[in-house]
Image (cartoon, helix red, strand yellow):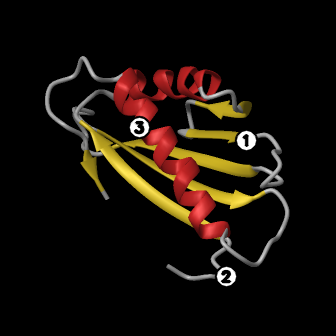
Amino acid sequence: MAVFEQHTTLSRQYPLPYATVFNAVPQVIQHLGHRLQHADPNQGIIRFSTGMSLTTWGENLTAQIAPVDPQQSATAVQLTSSGALPTLIAQGKRNRKVINAFFDELDRALQWQQGAPGQG
């Protein structure tokens, strides 16, 4: 883990069609109390942000969602987080915390599917 890491990207795969996963993401964003900024199903991009708190200025996040195979039997979600304002210390740790909370909630939202999601 880099102390001065500004951007963090993690990904998961779900054994579900693209539309199912894409449509679940805005619901997860709302459930977590984050603010949806942009959603484009044609490009597979969703942008959102977290709010400020006593310990952070907030984070800006971009989810890239894409089918893994031509049959769209599986979907990959790649999430990138960066601080809303440039900071130098511990942003990477905060980014991972926000990303992991998002994926935990997305896992719950899609839990009716069979099998566990693959982590990347």
Q: Which residue is drawn at 27% across and 28% down?
A: 16
Q: Earlier in the sequence, mark 1 or mark 2?
A: 2
What label does residue 16 carry, if any? Answer: none
Q: What element carries label 3?
A: helix
Residue 46 image point, x, y percent: 62, 38
Q: Which of 10 and 93 is in front in this view?
A: 93
Q: Mark 2 points at which residue?
A: 4
Q: Separation of disc 1 and disc 2 at Cα?
A: 20 Å
Where the C terminus falls, by quadrant? bottom left
Mark 2 and 3 residues: CB-CB less than 8 Å, in contact?
no
Front one among 63 and 107: 107
Q: Distance between the residues labelled 1 and 3?
A: 16 Å
Tell me what residue is drawn at x 72 percent, y 34 percent: 38
- In the picture, measured across the screen, residue 47 lies left or right of residue 31, that is right
Percent across and percent down for residue 69 are 24, 43
Tell me: residue 22, above or below residue 119: above
User: Callout 2, which amino acid?
Assistant: Phe
Q: Which of marks 2 and 3 is nearer the N terminus?
A: 2
Q: Mark 1 points at which residue?
A: 50
Q: Tell me: residue 118, above or below residue 94.
A: above
Q: Is residue 119 left or right of residue 18?
A: left
Q: Nearer the viewer, residue 4 or 14?
A: 4
Residue labelled with disc 3: 104
Q: What element carries label 2?
A: loop
Image location of residue 40, percent across then percent down: 63, 32
In three-dimensional space, the C-alpha distance between marks 2 and 3, rounded to whole angstroms, equals: 25 Å
Q: Position of residue 29 (x, y in %)?
A: 61, 29
